[in-house]
Amino acid sequence: MKVIVLAGITPSTFFAHVSLATALRNAGHQVMVTAAADDVVPAIAAAGLPAVPVMQPNLTREQIRAENGLAEVPADAVEREHWAGRLFAVIETLPMDSLVAFAEGWRPDVVIGGMLAYAAPLLAARLGVPYVRQAWDIHDPKLFDAGATAQLQKELADLGLTELPEPDLLIEVMPPSLREPGSKHGQMMRWFAGNTQCRLEPWMYTKGAEKRVGITVGTGVADYHQYDFVQGIVKNVATLDVEAAVAVPEEAVPTLRERLDDKNVEVGWIPLDILAPTCDVLVHQSGGSTMMTALSFGVPQVLLPDAGQFRQMDMARRLVEAGAAVMLTHEQATTEAIAEKCQEILSDPRYAAAAAGLAREIAALPLPSEVVRRIEWLVHAHN
């Protein structure tokens, strides 16, 4: 088969596709990966996958929002999710001419798109090939989809459609017990982290104390001057007699190493699939890829979602209800409160037990290599 994968707009969304794309190539199929952001191309290539650039370089999100009447972000979380669906629809379909030109020349047998890769169903419909939709995390994108459908009425009408096409195959990665009533059922697949790797140091994969707390607050530590916040978390966590392992982008490492010069603190850019299994607690901002990686290793989590982000709040709520996490919104997340929640998890074995149960569910799901067989069958049936 020839397979095109539309991998979203950030490295974290692309990473969710690495295991299946690699399994497809290992099964002898040709795979090409695109992303609706030119700066994701190096991450695709670094994962050993063919990267096809389709997006205009140096086009900022601010420009796109301003030019499409989306500059103002709604305050209400539900309205904001609908707005985000419209924004994703715009970004993902901007390179449609380039996508179509590439696809008509290369002639794929199937198109795989991430949950918010709204060019994927349109491209598949235009080419007359099966469309596979691949989940990135545990969130139901129905509000995003409603916004995207509203935004793409002209594009849909050009294809004789009024709604986004349903996928011929939906791939899900959530532990089955986290499924909510009424949600669509799809082909289950085991989650594997696909993050970028680096030259490892022993502290990255070996605890330096009996208990370790992993801390990551995203990629904007330097850009958003979050040094005081990270330093405050570590200072308060250090009172728990644990080791703190802080994962930050390379540009933030020198400043934080100078600030956090302590024998029980390690700081650096660490691949999350290396860090997570060494942790007894992982503190993070409720990103879907980070959440899934922690779940796959059975690590209980302290979640710091933005109350204005419906998706983050929804996923955090479900992990809390499953007993595998505690949650503090940004407004509640003082550095002292974060340390208290870490202590709560470390002191109560029920959190670790619940997280381990979810990890067992994930481990029991079909491997990407098994899902490849389902895609092969889909394409064969279509032809």
Image: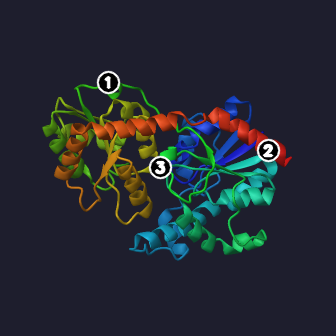
- Circle nearer the viewer, 1 or 3: 3
What residue is rendered at 69% in x and 33% in y?
A: 25
Residue furthest to the left = 239
Give the residue at the far front of this rendering.
181
Q: Earlier in the sequence, mark 2 or mark 3?
A: 3
Q: Image check: 380 left or right of 363? A: right
Nearer-the-camera pick, 305 or 158: 305
Looking at the picture, the colour scheme in use is rainbow
| In this view, 144 is above or below 192 | below
Looking at numbered disc 3 in the image, what kind of residue is underneath it?
Answer: Leu
76 in relation to 19, above or below? below
Q: Residue 206 carries which label?
A: 1
The residue singled out by tag 3 in the image is 178
What is the crowding at mark 3: few (fewer than 14 residues within 10 Å), some, or many (at least 20)? some
Which amino acid, mark 1?
Answer: Thr
| Callout 2 secondary element | helix
